[in-house]
Each structure stands twice: as structure tokens, then as C-alpha cells.
Image (spheres, rainbow, N blue to C red):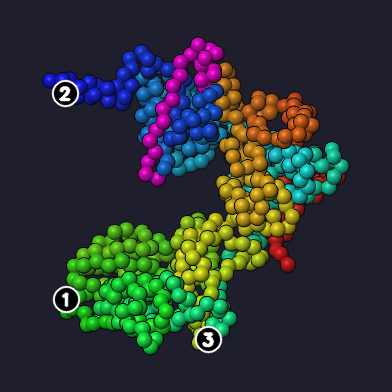
Amino acid sequence: MKKIISLIMCLVFVGCMFAGCTNKEDLKSDIVLITNGGTISDGGYNQSAWEGISAFAEENSMTCRYYQPVLDESGEITVENVEKYVELSAENGAKYIVLPGEEFAVSAYEVASIYPDINFILMEAVPHSADDTTDRYMSNVMSVSFDSLQSGFLAGYISVLNGNTELGYFGQNSSKNSASYGAGFVQGAAYAADSMGIPVTVDWAEYDSALLDYSYDFTIQACYEKIEDQDDTTFTVNIVDGLGSGTYTEGSNVTVTANPAPEGMVFDCWEVKSDTEGVRDSKVNVSSEKTPTINLIVEKCDCTISAKYVEADESNVNVEVMNANGSGVYEAFSVEEGGSCTITAPVAENNMVFDHWETDAQVEFEDAESSSTEIKNVNEDIQVTPVYTVSETPTFNVTVVTGEGGNGDSTGSGSYTAGDLVTLVSAPPQDGYMFSHWENVDAYGNSTGIAMENEYNYGTTFEMADRYASICDTMFNNGVTTIFTGGNDKSDSAFTSKWDFDTELNVITAGQQNGDAYTTIVNNYGEAIKDCLADFKGGTVSLASCATDGIFASFVSDDEEIQAQYDEVYKALADGKIALIQVQSNGAGYDFCKYYNEQKPSKCLTLNGWFLEGFSLE
């Protein structure tokens, strides 16, 4: 009986945990925050928004609460999900609902008109429909933007104030705010340079500008060395009808792969023989003799490993993987009727990307949109053709070459997007040589930022890196010590470059506070939301700036004098005593650079716009 009572008590307790054991009256809230899926202690926008809401509610004897939606499989918040929380908020008396970010722009457009009695505060966005990004001003939606020109000004001013005289702006042509952030950065640096009477340069580059003559492509070379130059004892591995031949040191782990079976044949086994007198065949250390891909641990002997094939069973069927557009056979398999096999598409050509598989046969693809997938229920001879399209996302071209001492072509060349897995296989070495390592370099001699699984293995892989870091590499190579990334969704590229070079180099960001940055010009959601709650004006856009404490630097300097100078300039911006050159709403960064160089408003600052006449390195 006691166990039954205990069980009932536990069930009641669990029910309280999920239901909250809250009276309906306790759910009533004047102000509601719907987070972007993150928590209110994320150290970012959700936390800042909640702190502002909580403070305002306490000061004005109002109630508040938040909802943390579950994101969909792609990690995004859906309009349907937001609408459920808005409906719940409306049922519980919400007067204001705060939506923190651009990802809520479509939700605000879809939902606000359904609830005209609720005032919505939308951060860093104006409502728009799903298929049209035209701004739609709604009577019960107040939007908030942040003064990117002033943010950039503070970043540039802090950079020079702290002794940096060679600066870089890493921009984004397709970003609405990028030109404004960059224009502010240039003017802030110029203000400090002119005040201090020191020469300062700013290099400006927009990674996606069509006018930027910059190559993101790179070359990977298979390198070999003469066996006679090798200090350790080496052993020869000969692979017949497969990959893996070469000269290796004892203990090397060699991946051995059989060639595709000839037509009408199937792989049967490996024949393994020692080629060193006095060493038995059994001493050749292979992981298996029955699978077409095996591992060999090189022992103190030469060896020959031969792939053996047998005639396919009459019931077997053939699977041919074609090259793009059906132009020849890329590889072929023989599988049991009704069976399955894994197919992989050839690497995409330059600026193309794999899209899907096509076949006239009745087979089942595990994922027809994956370049490597399994096909099931193969009941007849079939041909499967990979289809490629022009990539909508940036692709980076990789050329794999064979260095001196190699015999034939090394593989892996192609066009890849960031995140793709790239597989490299070196050509077999010539007589008297052995594979040494892989080398990679871009068109300007910079690091490519890739990390190989094992650069000393003839067959290895790496994940395609974000090659936009090469822009920052070039800046740092040319002497830049501080890069500003405001308005750029590739900000992480600057950090990738920083860690490759020197941790003493600086990256300054804008928007959400970044612990890796020297400083962030933070968009103060909490303060901006408090201002909107205090004076809500639907159908308008509130500009958060220095005048409203809507932006601030997360760090300036440990030097009290520098901090005091910054505080003085911040106040001057807030009071409107520093006039800034505005960027036209339809203007891009290069328009500002051209105008700035023509007007020459600074005596001490030189602006180098890489894209004005095209950029190239000698």
C-alpha cells in the first residue's frame, strides 16, 4: 500500500514539474519574451532582452515571463511555433511581446495582424513576408535598429587609441549594414589619427564583392623524398589491382583498397605474401583478407598484396555509376539480386555542386540528394547518374598535384563548399622514392586554414575550411594589427586567421558580445527594449545609439587615460557634436571608399579600398 501511495506521489510531483503547478492567475503576464530558442542566460541577446524586460516590469509594477521555443530539425524557429506562443501569451493577458531578432521578421508580419491589441517589439528587423523582403510597417509593431555608423566609429577610435596604426575592415557587400559599419570604422580611426597627429592606414575588403579580384582557390601537392635520404629502415609494399603501393617505415598504417571488380567479376579476397627471405607470409599484418578495404601495419618485411576476383554469381546484377551527364562509367559494382551497395559521386567540377542522383531503374535511394548514399533493392542491371548544378553557396576550387618523385596523378581535385569532406590519394612513388607528406598553399603563399586528418599519410581527408579567412591572412601578412568585422556574417573567418598568425593580433566585432574579440561594440537589447516599452510607437523604427545607451564597448583599455578619452568621445557622439558622413541607403562599401578618397576629409588617414581597381598581389 505504501509503495502505491509513493508511486502516486511521484506521478503528482512529475506532473507538477511539467505543468509548473501554477494557478492560471500566475500565468498572467503583461510583457512576454519569446526567445530565439536560446536560454535567458545565454550571455547574448536573449539574456540582454530579458534583463531589460525584467527591470522595466519591476520599475513599473508589471508582470513578465518568457517562452523558449523548440527549434525545428534545421535549427530554425518556425512561424507556426511562434504563433502558438503568441496565442498562449494573448490568452494570458499579454500587452507587449518582444521578438529578439531578424529570424522573427516573418513571424511578426504573419501574427501581429491577428492580435491587433498586443504591441510587438521586433529587434533589428522590420516585418516582411516570407517571399518578399520589402519592409512592412504595421501599426502594432515597433522595430529597433542599432546605429551601425556610430558602432563602427567607436571600433575605429578604440583601435587607434590603443596604438594600432595599420587597420583592416573585413566587410560584406551583400550586407545592408556592412557599408555603414565600415564607414564608421574609417571615420573613427581618422578622428583619433587627426587628434593624435599620427599616420594611420585602413585596408578595406568585402569578401563577396564582384569587384574584388581575389582568388580563394588553392593547390595541394603530394610530396616525396628519396629513399636514400631516409634515416629509418624502409620496406616496400606492392599492391596489385589496388591502391596503397609505396615505401614505408616500420609501424606505418597503410589503407589498402581494391580496384573496382572487372565486369562480370566480384572481389573475393586478398592474397598476402612476404617478399623478404626468412619472413613468413603470416607476418604481413593485415586487418582482413576478405574485405575490399583493409589496413596494413608495416612490419619488418617487404610484401605483395594482390586483390583476387571471381566470377559473379549468375544472379548478380551490375551497378554502374556514371560521370556527370552520363559521359562514361566512373565506377561499377556487382551485387546480389535484391541487394544493395554504397555509391559515391565524382567530385564536382569548378563552381559546381552535387545536386541529386537519377536513374531509370526501380531502386530505393537512402538519400537521393547525398553525394554518397546507399541504393537498395537492386534487381536489374542499372546505371546511376549524378546531377550537378551551379552552386548557390560559395565554392572553393582545389587542385591536387603530384610532386617530384611521384608516378601519375594524385586525386582529390575539385570544387567544394565549406564543410565538405575532401579525400586525397597520392600517386604511387617512382622507384627510389617514398611518399613524404602533403603541402598546401594558396595563390598568395598564405596558409589555407585546412586541417588534414594525417598529412603524412598518402591517403587522407580534411574538411573544407571557410576560405574567406585568406582575406584576413593577407591583411595580417601586410602588417595589419587590428581587423573590424562589423556587419559581416563571416566574422569567424577573422578569428580563424588570428589563431593561425598571432594571438596578439586584434579582432573587433559588433552586435552580440564575443569573448574572443579584443572588444565588441555591443547592441544593448535590454536598454533598447526598455525605451520601446516606455514610449511604444507602432509602425516606426527606433534607432538605438550612444544617445540612448543603445550601444557600448565591452572593453576599451586598462589605461585610465585611454578610457577617459573614450568616454569623452562617446559623450560627444551622444550629444551630436561629432558629425559623421552617412552612407546612402542603396550604397555599398566601395561607394563610400570612392567618396571618402575624393573628399579627403582626414589629414592623417589613408584608405585603401582593395576593390576600387581590382586587387592583386605581386
Asked whether the residues under the numbered discs 2 and 1 touch, taking CB atoms below 8 Å apart as contact, a structural biologist would say no
**Mark carried by residue 3:** 2
Pick whichever, 609 or 445, lies toward us. Answer: 445
Q: Residue at x 61, y 62 (%)?
A: 447
Q: Is residue 60 magenta?
A: yes
Secondary element under disc 1, as helix, strand or loop, is loop
Residue 222, above or below 23: below
> Can residue 603 be seen from the camera position used here?
yes
Bounds of the magenta span? Answer: 53-74
* Mark closest to the chain's N terminus, 3 or 2: 2
> In which image quadrant can residue 546 be found?
top right
Callout 3: helix, strand or loop? loop
Q: Is residue 81 magenta?
A: no
Q: Is residue 175 above or below residue 359?
A: above
Rendered location of residue 381, percent (x, y): 23, 74
- The three-letter code of the residue at mark 1 reads Ser
Q: Where residue 432 is drawn, which disc sits there? A: 3
Q: Residue flagged by tag 2: what amino acid is it?
A: Lys
Q: Earlier in the sequence, mark 3 or mark 1?
A: 1
